[in-house]
Amino acid sequence: MNKYPADRNDFFKKACSFEAALILVAVVLGWIADINPFADLHFSESAVAYGLVGTMPLFLLYLSLERIQTESVIKIKHMLFETLGSGLHRYHWTDLLILASIAGLSEELLFRGVIQPWIESSWGMTAGLVGSNIIFGLAHAVTPLYAVLAILVGIYLSLSLDYGGDRNLLIPIVIHGFYDFLAFIALMRAYRASRLSDSKE
């Protein structure tokens, strides 16, 4: 009983620290490549609105995958349940919002703020779009299907950079962070429901 709060706090600190460390990675890589990760990050109400609306297709995809029962999708769901679900179900929604916000900011600064423009500067925009998101997919390659889905999601996030005519990193940051938050909430609720069902049997 006494260990529960410590474990809870430890999980949250480790998750936030890992994601926040990616900001430092982005800054260091940006320094090496002479790219400012924050150069295309501008606050605007329209960018926030585009980001919130742009989250919906990704979350609908998440909900659709919940209904698919193929072996590869079941493997992903089981993996998420056993890793994220078991850790997230103890948390308040505000904790999940903090973690999702840090993840959205840090991963977008790294992949869309540094790696994509770095590749673009040498091989062009198409290579930057594809190359940065192959790396993004490999970084999320917990299963082969998950890696493919991450590549497709990454391409979607990269395309959102230029939505509205001006490149703004805030759009994919909002999409990424808000999607993670909704997915965390859905996963947490499903895990809690599963535990409740098991306890009644």
Image (cartoon, rainbow, N blue to C red):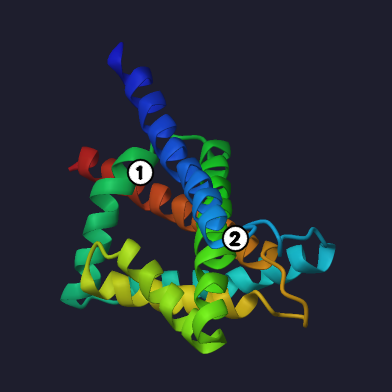
User: As displayed, is residue 189 above or below residue 36?
Assistant: above
Q: Is residue 181 visible?
A: no
Badge 2 element:
loop
Badge 1 element:
helix
Relative depth, front residue between 37 and 139: 37
> Which residue, given by chain and number where applicable, does mark 2 sit on?
34
Which residue of the protein is positioned furthest toward the right in this rendering?
Answer: 45
First in sequence: mark 2 or mark 1?
Answer: 2
Quick check: 4 left or right of 47?
left
State how far apart marks 2 and 1 are (Cα): 46 Å
> What's the residue at 27%, 42% (across, down)?
195
Q: Is residue 145 visible?
A: yes
User: As displayed, is residue 160 above or below residue 109?
Assistant: below
Q: Position of residue 136 (x, y in %)?
A: 40, 67
Relative depth, front residue between 72 and 117: 117
Res 164 → quadrant: bottom right
Q: Position of residue 183 (x, y in %)?
A: 46, 58
Q: Amino acid at mark 2?
A: Asp
> What's the residue at 42%, 49% (across, down)?
189
Q: Which disc is residue 192 wearing?
A: 1
Whether pointer 2 and pointer 1 mark residues with C-beta atoms closer than 8 Å, the reply is no
Q: Tag 2: Cα neighbours inside 10 Å, few (<14), some, or many (≥20)?
A: few
Quick check: 120 left or right of 189?
right
